Image (cartoon, rainbow, N blue to C red):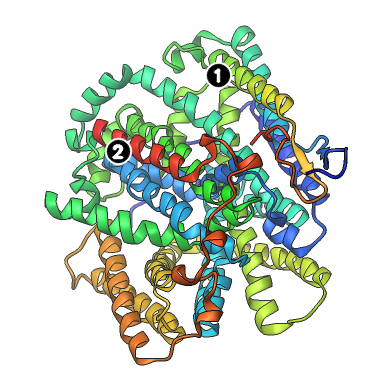
Amino acid sequence: MHVLAEANLRLNASAIDYVLLAFYFVLVLGIGYLARRQVSSSLDFLLSGRSLPAWVTGLAFISANLGAVEIMGMSANGVLYGLPTVHYFWIGAIPAMLFLGIVMMPFYYGSKVRSVPEFMRRRFGKPAHLVNGVSFAAAQILIAGANLFLLASVVNLLLGWPIWLSIVIAAVIVLSYTALGGLSAAIYNEVLQFFVIVAALLPLTIVGLVKVGGWQGLVDKVTGSPGGSEQLHSWPGDNLTGFGNNFLSVLGLVFGLGFVLSFGYWTTNFVEVQRAMASKSMSAARRTPIIGAFPKMLVPFIVIIPGMIAAVTVSEYVQDKQVLLDGGDAPTGVTPNNAILLLMRDLLPNGMLGVAIAGLLASFMAGMAANLSSFNTVVTYDIWQTYVKKDRPDGYYLRLGRRVTVVGTVLAIGTAFIASNSGNILNYLQDLFSFFNAPLFATFILGMFWKRMTPAAGWIGLVLGTASAITVWGLSQAEILGLTGQGISFVAAGTAFVVDVVVSVGVSLATKPKADKELVGLVYSLTPKETRTHDETGENAGWYRKPGLLAGIVLILTIGLNIIF
Amino acid sequence: MATESKPATRRAGAFDIRMIIALLVGVYGVVLTIMGIGFTTDADLAKAADVNINLWAGIGMLVFAILFVVWAKARPLQVPTEQPESGDAPPAGE
């Protein structure tokens, strides 16, 4: 194996950049300290006492997902695929977020469950609950570790700190505010992080656009570069799906990404749903994902466009784009993941550079804190309180929640070190865990609308659905199925969804359902209208606080964006 | 139908996340604006496609911070100490 040239990513950070960065960290820890005063019970710690306003939870909803993997990954897709990457936002997130707010939130919030696995337990009983709870907790540690490792490797590239040192320092910072202030501290910090990320990426995008000569300049340059004009239109996105057929590609995007993958992620992933559960009323809970959809619509402009700009202005990419498109290693040593960093290196003067570094680190910590704060809730309530020690006073679970946060951090550090030795294992595992989400959505949606669905169907459907996704993925990795690129995950998720539905219906018809009275609040036909709907008086009054109307506005804007681009 | 004369809310004190956001973005705005006015070299300008990005981003951040302070002052955070029931209170700022 020949050694590639080391890409030069070291940024010229000066004292003023470090001061700006340090000021951000002071506020991050300050929020943890201030949020601590609001914590007096386990529900305060693990679910913010269900007290937050909708705009706070809505921004946290987006920020929790705007972690390292998202920013680096989506700008990398911008380099490689260009505009079709917007599908991950407009098709792959918005419809599912609206669906969560309008259709599913009434059951999540109305039933007063404290977590998504807890909903599983009340609807389908313990086997399904254990499958969901344990796989979720394990996935969180894994993703937290991946975020941590990515953060450390970026700090290493940018500032030259050793990887182990950055891993430990970042973990200690995240741990101190989440262990002090619990979910409130995590959520408040996510809101702050959202604004810092925007403050970092928006100026970068603007300078980048000026540099390439405006939008038209970008269009001309991308057209002339490898990949060509296919990278300038979101549809049909053949280059993204790798299907090589317009019709199949559109079908894959709409059903694979837009329906199965994204609904599975956004509507059943407790990291996201937890933010809505922390809001102060049914109306606010329903508005949480819908308010989050407004910024989500615009995030691609400050993540994907910089990637596209980097691809045609950064000298390493100009030289090596074709090699990267072919999946090879660039002779200059850059990878698509470096896009934002290279653009910062090329364009930003000291001062703005410090803000941009703060924004990147903010996004990395946002992801990790979100994983930790949902991990401790599931372990405390769903695993410990349900299966280990049931009837303890609340103070016991509050202390436990804090300890679980510490344990989770230590495990995440361990995962990060494993990743730093063998990065590929972690990628494979992340792929695998993503397969737990696709069948989950099938199980939830059947369970919420079909009261005949039985507890046995709940867990058998999940297990077989996940197994079928893993099978498809394994066959593709072994090159028995001729799928490439993102197409693999679309097909795997679609298979899991279908298998889950078929198995669940089959098993339900053969086994005994739960009594109707046990399903009140959990199933549509058995839930009184009052507990499903929200109050529209007082601080929930006003047209701009109506979830349905807001969702309509988001939908129209999203369709408009799809037509324009 | 309020049986008490005092509204059952209290000011939430300093911990309004809007003020913390305004503090961070405001300080960044001040620093960047000063950098933009006083410490921008020709090399910096050439790097950023002749845009004085520190100055413009700084001004933008200052405007943003001021808007957030105005919002927080105009609609202060209300924390209910009893059951929230009064419908005649002005809508809380969120």
Residue at label 2?
A: A559
Residue at the location (74% across, 59% down)? Answer: A45
Residue at the location (55% across, 67% down)? Answer: A116
Circles 2 and 1: CB atoms closer than 8 Å = no
Count residues near mark 1 (Cα–Cα under 10 Å), then give few for <14, some for 14-19, many for 20+.
many
How far across and how far down the image is residue A127, in percent?
Answer: 51, 84
Q: Establish if A4 lies above or below A308.
A: below
Task: Work out whether residue A564 or residue A341 is closer to the camera in this orientation and state it.
Answer: A564
| Parent chain of label 2 | A
Residue type, numbered disc 2? Ile
Examine the rendering and report whether any part of residue A351 can be seen.
yes
Q: In which quarter of the image is residue A87?
A: top left
How far across and how far down the image is residue A16, in percent?
Answer: 67, 24
Examine the rendering and report whether any part of residue A156 can be seen.
no
Residue at label 1?
A: B57
| Parent chain of label 1 | B
Position of the N terminus of chain A by quadrant: bottom left
Q: Which mark is residue A263?
A: none
Residue type, numbered disc 1? Ala
How far across and how far down the image is residue A386, in percent?
Answer: 66, 80
Q: Which of marks 2 and 1 is in front?
A: 2
Describe residue A372's horizontal placement relative to residue A502 as left or right: right
Task: Work out whether residue A252 or residue A200 is closer to the camera in this orientation and state it.
Answer: A252
In the rendered image, the residue lying farthest to the right is B5
Dot 1: element: helix
How far across and how far down the image is residue A277, in percent?
Answer: 60, 57
Q: Quadrant of residue A436?
A: bottom left
Position of the C terminus of chain A by quadrant: top left
Describe residue A523's horizontal placement relative to residue A77 as left or right: right
